[in-house]
Amino acid sequence: MTERADGVDERILDAALDRILQFGIRRASLEDIARRAGLSRITIHRRFAGKDNLIEAVLARETRRMLAEVTAIAATADSVDAQIEDTMLYVLLQTRIHRLVTQLLRVAPEEALRFSTAQGERLVSIGIEYIVGMLTHAQSAGLIAAYNPHPVAELVARLAHSLLLTPGGGSVDFTDDERARAFVRTTIVPLIRHGITRPDEELTHDHVRDRPGTAPRPAP
């Protein structure tokens, strides 16, 4: 059995996350991470080629864990609209209260903004990839309209990332759960159900809304 199959990578990622949460990114040294994982620094370098790549891998794993929870939430909702609303609220909430965010603010506040911006590109890319997959699956099942999922996925992913940086200050205070839910219900749900529509497509989408589970005919 190989070291990778033994879960060595997971041990390293667990140790790195533990050190980051306790000390912050800058003070979480590879030596400390290796000691926590019970491995050598050389092993970490061989698998992740340095601290920057390791930090990126930690972020990617935490993001995928959150998205797996999103999938589980979607499976329990009783309608398409409820699936969209519940999952989007969860994502928007996690961007504010995830332990990587809250702990960095506590133990290394000077690093929190730098982390959110420097790692933001990777975070947004993972989010877009996941959302495109979910939208494509829903379209194949006839649950939402047939449209290009990439622009919608990018809008949603970038909204979530912007709320990580600035949850308040606009016309909607996303720290208020009821206001956040109302925004998602009236803005995000229609966007995901129908895509970015042109005026001449609205009649088609209104017609589809009355027939749940039916994909729309392409607009002329």
Image (cartoon, rainbow, N blue to C red):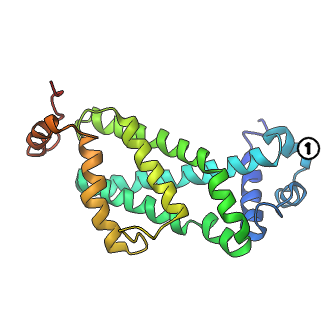
Asked whether residue 182 is in view, the answer is: yes
- Residue 202: name its quadrant: top left
Relative image position of residue 1 (x, y in whole percent): 77, 35
Relative image position of residue 31 (x, y in whole percent): 90, 56
Query: Residue visible at 78% across and 64% down?
Result: 19
Q: How many marks?
A: 1
Image side of residue 10 versus residue 187, left or right: right
Nearer to us in this view, 123 or 114: 114
Relative image position of residue 2 (x, y in whole percent): 78, 35
Image side of residue 198 versus residue 48, left or right: left
Asked whether residue 83 is in view, the answer is: no
Image side of residue 44 versus residue 201, left or right: right
Name of the residue lying farthest toward the top: 220
Which residue, given by chain and number where applicable, does mark 1 sit on? 42
- Residue 210: name its quadrant: top left
- Residue 195: name its quadrant: top left
Query: Residue visible at 47% across and 56% down?
Result: 160
Report the amino acid beneath label 1: Ile
Query: Residue visible at 25% across and 45% down?
Result: 193
